[in-house]
Image: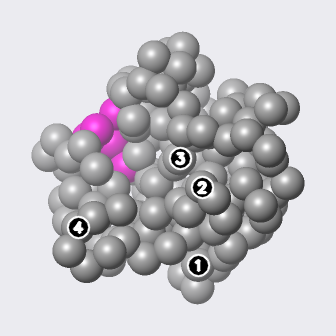
Amino acid sequence: MALLVRLEDFLDRSGVAYTHTVHPLAYTAREVAAAEHLPAQEVAKVVVFLAENGYRMVVLPASKIVDFQEMRAMLGFFHARLATEKELAQLFPDCDLGAMPPFGNLYGMPVYLDETLLSDNQIAFNAGTHRDVVHVRLDDFRRLVNPEVVSLAREVMSHGGW
């Protein structure tokens, strides 16, 4: 809950309108979408990776995955790998594991926003727990986070594979 208070304070101080909802326990972004009765496209998930110049965050729709090979090439990284659970726990000590919000700026972390999220006016995302979700206008999110817009996300294979 510590992150939720910090995030709401940040949004309030920034003059951003938002909605906070609480739903039954949901661990994946697709489960959050179902619990929130939203299309998976409107729920933003966070993927944290480590490259040679530090940790970074990719924000993409719940319905997509990151193509790491393409990401390395597009962003010019020689090495980039998914952050481990231990690293996530250290990077986001005020969040449940895997429930970090897409506000990398609150953690000194650059953020990449997948362009497929630009098709919606609003995004919803985990707010530090597997029950709390915050909904904000995409324009407000972009103004506050100043993410680099990229094209990194790919469709999840229909048979559930990666």
Q: Amino acid at mark 4?
A: Gly
Q: Judge whether residue 136 can be spotted in this image.
A: no
Task: Report crowding for label 3: few under 14, some 14 to 19, many 20 or more residues within 10 A (C-alpha).
Answer: some
Q: Does residue 123 appear to the left or right of 31 in the view shown?
A: right
Q: Quadrant of residue 140?
A: bottom right
Q: Quadrant of residue 62?
A: bottom left
Of pointers 2 and 1, the one earlier in the residue sequence: 2
The residue lying at 20 percent from left, 74 percent from top is 159
The residue lying at 54 percent from left, 39 percent from top is 82
Q: Nearer the viewer, residue 121 or 31?
A: 31
Residue wearing tag 2: 68
Of pointers 2 and 4, the one earlier in the residue sequence: 2
Q: Amino acid at mark 1?
A: Thr
Mark pair 2, 4: CA separation: 18 Å
Q: Looking at this rendering, what residue extends furthest in the bottom direction?
A: 119
Residue wearing tag 3: 47
Instruction: Report the span colored magenta.
Output: 129-133
What is the secondary structure assignment of the residue under circle 3?
Answer: strand
Q: Position of residue 85 (x, y in %)?
A: 42, 24
Q: Does residue 58 appear to the left or right of 37 in the view shown?
A: right
Residue wearing tag 1: 116
What is the secondary structure assignment of the residue under circle 1?
Answer: helix
